[in-house]
Amino acid sequence: MRRNATGPAAMLLAAALLSACGPDGGTAPAPTRTLQVGATAYWGGDVIDLQSAYETRQPDGRPAVGVLVAATLAGPATLASVRPHYFLETHGQPLAELTGPAPWGENTATVSEGGLLEARDLGGAGQQLHLEDLSLVITAPGKVRAVLPLVPGAPGAEPLAPVPLHASADILATGRYRLALHAAELRGDCTLNVGGGNLPGRPVSALDAGRHTVTVQFDVPFGTTGDGLALRLTLPDGRTLAPTGPLNLMATGEGIPGSGNLAAWFDFDGPTAGRYTLTATDAGAAPAAITLE
């Protein structure tokens, strides 16, 4: 379960970190300005909380900017594949990569607190930076970008938050299967890690740039394999997709006791608005369908 990472304890932690040490373990200059941000992005299966940001002046007069972030794995799986990189942008233009002990959600019960990241040498001595003009960008080569302005409410935010899809029915019954819908979402942050990715054995990977996925999860008796079960998703533009990879069975503490989540992922590019149709067919049986929107 995700813990709140933006409460008073986190703010005290931010103050202690900003006054005590920099990302390389040395003494950090006292911040000239600190903002409590409290914004959240989703990337590669992680929920990433941007807790606070600060600006400061280095001993040689050049400006530096730091952020405090924490991460929790969002699921619906146990381990994420790709580690993100953190950058600063100004008005959509790259400024610098942030360095330090970047947090990374390891499982659904853990928050990696104290991820203090900093970018130094941002311009010449005496140059003025404005936190209002900066955004935190979370990405990796060739992958989607999550964007959080350092000032809440500023334009340009792209948090990649999952969008729940509402189903026309809760049950898909076909042949041997009676699939109880657990959740359906349109996601812009992660998908099934087909082919191993850069960390084999971790089932979630960040989406490629320009891609989306629809994920559906069903509560099923644990041990269900989906043998002989064909799932198809028809997009609003009429294209019909098979799952991106094999149906994925995961143990869960939610839903029906003693059950697991049978999950399918459908990756695509193009428009996302409109009605989706999910069809399930057991081998030799009549199909069953529900709509998602």
Image (cartoon, grey):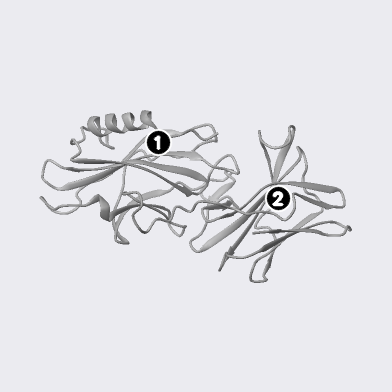
Q: Which residue is mark 2?
A: 247
- Name the element at disc 1: loop
Q: Position of residue 35 (x, y in %)?
A: 28, 42
Q: Nearer the viewer, residue 196 or 137?
A: 137
Q: Which residue is mark 1?
A: 6
Residue type at numbered disc 2: Leu
Task: Say whether residue 269 is left or right of residue 65.
Answer: right
Quadrant of the rendering where the C terminus is positioned: bottom right
Vertical comparison of 175 with 105: above or below:
below
Q: Say whether marks 2 and 1 touch (CB < 8 Å).
A: no
The number of numbered discs placed on residues in the rendered structure image is 2
Task: Say whether residue 215 is left or right of residue 171.
Answer: left
Are there few (<14), some (14-19), or many (20+) residues within 10 Å of tag 2? many
Q: In terms of image quadrants, where is residue 269?
A: bottom right
Task: Say whether residue 97 is left or right of residue 62.
Answer: right
Q: Position of residue 113 (x, y in %)?
A: 40, 33
Reading the chain from its start, which is encountered first: label 2 or label 1?
1
